[in-house]
Image (spheres, rainbow, N blue to C red):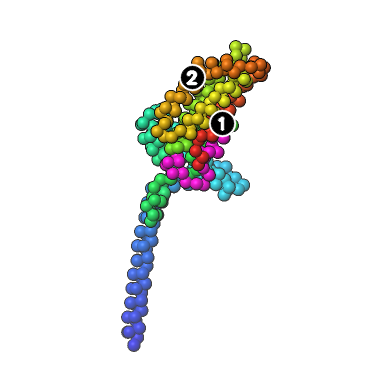
Amino acid sequence: MIYVVYLTALENFDMADKRKELLNSFDGEKKQVHMEYMQKSELLPQIRKALLKLIENKPSEPMLFLANYFDSVSSNDKTDKIANAMQVLQLTNHRQAVFQTNLMIAFDMVSVARSASSKKAVNKRPGLTGSVYEDLLKAIGTKIPKDIFDELFKQIGCRPNEMVPFDIFRYGVTVCYVCIDFINLCGDIFQTLCNKVSSDIADKYICDFVIDSFKNVITTTSGMQKCEQPAAVLEAGYMLCPDKLAIDLLNGKDDKCGKSTMSRHDFLCSMCQTFFSKIKSL
């Protein structure tokens, strides 16, 4: 009887040792997987830097300090992405066909990778957040006056927490570049209209006449069918050519001419307001 109990105890010890060995092997595999993940994601260097900064500064609120530190790191990464995307977008003019390829490259640069463990294939694709999309449009629109850009962004912008698909990204970026060209063109027109006294002031009657002519052209051509668009472009060019505007202006000249002035900014805002009325709101 004692011998049987002794054998049973030995078997229990053997089973316990095997369990420990098995658990140790599992723990070893888990540690290896965890270490590979940490090294692959490059988290360890960032964590070491954060802890060193924490020890050096010894803030009164360490958790808040770490949160601000990692937020600044992620902001720097976002800034680098936007700068790289801007370099690609500026390689060629938006009117050229290769610009469409650059748009796709830029979209991948500013997008964030989705989880590779997701079961849905669509979630494995890169995605662009609304906040990064807004920052990129602001970087493109630095040549646009702020109040004009704010009005433009109301129509082509997205919410910060939204995911922006490529079609929306392409539309918003292209509209920004077209708007820059339009503002430059309006600036050249205003330079022609301004008087000899100042390059920032022009006759308000003449400016209003040009603005109204532009509105009439936009209204007339936008109502035409798709098959009539080539002819509409020619008609619009004729109605807005300098000679035609000068003749119409002389025929309609009255006592209001020369009595009041308009600034460059007001002229640009009025022209852009008409331009934005024909932009598709997202």
Crowding near the residue tagged with mark 2, few <14, some 14–19, many ≥20 C-alpha atoms within 10 Å:
few
| Other-residue count near label 1 (Cα within 10 Å), few / some / many at <14 / 14–19 / ≥20 | some
Give the residue number, with chain letter if any, for mark 1. 273
In this rendering, is residue 49 above or below 277?
A: below
- Secondary structure of residue under mark 2: loop
Image mark for residue 241: 2
Q: Nearer the viewer, residue 268 or 76?
A: 268
**Quarter-of-image position of residue 197:** top right
State the mark number for residue 257.
none
Q: Is residue 168 magenta?
A: yes
Q: Nearer the viewer, mark 2 or mark 1?
A: 2
How far from the left and from the top, in percent, is residue 94? 41, 30
Among numbered discs 2 and 1, the one appearing first in the sequence: 2
Q: Residue at x 62, y 47 (%)?
A: 60
| Kind of residue sitting beneath label 1 | Gln
Q: How far apart, in angstroms, are the residues tagged by discs 2 and 1? A: 21 Å
Bounds of the magenta span? 149-169
Instruction: Return the x and y of residue 208 as percentages of the image width and height.
Output: 60, 23
Q: Is residue 268 visible?
A: no
Q: Is residue 224 magenta?
A: no
Residue under the image location 37 percent in, 65 percent down: 23
Q: Is residue 207 above or below residue 223?
A: above
Number of numbered discs on residues: 2
Residue type, mark 2 in image: Cys
- Left or right: 38 with respect to 64? left
Q: Quadrant of the N terminus?
A: bottom left
Please report contact status of discs 2 and 1: CB closer than 8 Å, yes or no: no
Q: Residue at x 39, y 54 (%)?
A: 120
Residue at the top extreme?
Answer: 196
